[in-house]
Amino acid sequence: MKRVITALLAVCCLFMSGCRAEELQQFLIVTAIGVDKEKDDYKVTFEAVKGQAENAESIEPLLKKGEGVTLPRCLQNVQETSGQYPYLRHASILVVSESAADDSLEHLFGYIRNEHNIMLNTRLLLCEGEAADVFNDDSFLSTRIMKASTTGSETMATADLMVKDFLYDLYADGIDAFIPLTSKEKTGGVAFLRDFSIAGKLEPRLTPAFLIVRNLANSGEIGVSGEGGFYSFRLLDSKSTLKTVISGEKAVISVSVKASFRAEDVLYGDLSVYEKALKSRLESDIREVADIMKTCRSDVFGAGQYLYRYKTDEWEKVKENWADIFANSIFDVKVDASIKSTGKIKEEQR
C-alpha cells in the first residue's frame, strides 16, 4: 500500500506542477538511485515506477541504467535508450558505491547541491561493493532498505542521514561527516569521511555508541551480561555533551553521556549490577569509536567544532594542525546509565 501511495504522490506532484497525462509518459518516476564509477565513467542505476502488477494490487519496479563521464550524461543516456527522462525529485534513497565515493564524492554532491535534481531529504547510504548489485532483484530497493533501516534503528544499528544533513556538515559547517553503510545482504554500520574521502568504517556493533554520542539515538536496544545471563534493555532517553580543552600540545576531549533504559527481560538480583554493566558497555564502546576516529583522523564527533564555536582564540592557534592534534588527543568518557523501568525483578536465583 505504501508503494502505491508513494507512486501516486509522485504523479500528483507532477500534475500539480502543470504536467498533462501525455507529458508524464516522457518521465521515469524514480524512487531510488544507485551510483557506481568504473575508471572515468559513472554507471547509474535508476529504480522507477513501472505500473501495476498483473494482480492490480501493487506497483512494480522498473530498472534503468545509464552511463557517461558526467551525471547529466547518464540521465541523457537513459533518455536516449528508453525515450523517458529520469525524474529524480521523489527519489527516497541515494546509494553511492565505494568506487564512486573514492574519487568523485565532492563532484557528485557538488552537482546535487548546485542542480537540485535530487530532493534534499533523500536518504543517503554508502554501499559496500557495487550499488548496481543492490538493485538486482524484483522488489523495490527503496522499500526494502527503508524497512531494513527502520529495523536497524530499533537496535540502534544504523544511522539515518539525509542529503541535506550531509551537505550542511561538509559545505556549510565544514566538519568531517559520516555516511550509513548498506550492502545487498544487510544495512548497518557507518563510514567516516575526511575531506570528502572515506577515511574509515565503523561496524554495526559500535554504531549504537556512535549514535548516542551524536545525539542521534532516539530509540533502540542494547544488550549486556549480568547475573549469569544476557539481558536486553531499550533506550528511553539519552543526552550527550562534548567539550574540548587544549592542554599544552594535546587536546583533551570530554564526552559525557546520561542515558536511561527499560529492561526488556526479567531481571534477577541487584538492579545496580545491570546499571554498572550498561555503563561499562557504553564507555568501552565509545572509547573504541574514539580510537577509530583518531586512527582515520576523522573528527566526526565535532571536537574541533567545539573550539571553533566556543573557544575561538584557542581554535585559531591549533586549526592548522588540528588533524595531528586530534589524532593524538585524549578522550575522557563518562557514562551515567540508569534503569527507569524494570518490568519485574526476581530476587531468587533460577
Image (tube, rainbow, N blue to C red):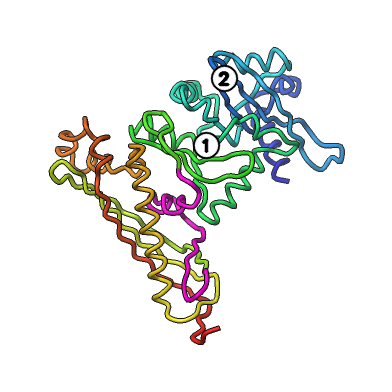
Q: Quadrant of residue 74?
A: top right
> Between 275 and 173, which is closer to the camera in this rendering?
275
- Mark closest to the chain's N terminus, 2 or 1: 2
Q: Which mark is residue 121?
A: 1
Look at the image and say whether residue 104 sits in the magenta stretch. Answer: no
Going 34% across and 65% down the picture, which residue do you hit? Answer: 336
Q: Quadrant of residue 55?
A: top right
> Between 109 and 18, which is closer to the camera in this rendering?
109
Q: Are marks 2 and 1 in contact (CB under 8 Å)?
A: no
| Helix, strand or loop status at disc 1 | loop
**Magenta region:** 202-230
> Between 210 and 29, which is closer to the camera in this rendering?
210
- Residue 215 seen in the current view: yes
- Residue 113 seen in the current view: no
Within 10 angstroms of label 1, few (less than 14), some, or many (20 or more) residues? some
| 217 up-or-down from 349: above or below | above
Q: Position of residue 5 (x, y in %)?
A: 70, 41
Q: Position of residue 125 (x, y in %)?
A: 53, 37
Q: Quadrant of the C terminus?
A: bottom right
Q: Residue furthest front?
A: 228
Q: Residue furthest left?
A: 248
Q: Say how many tags the image has.
A: 2
Q: Which residue position is annotated with label 2?
A: 38
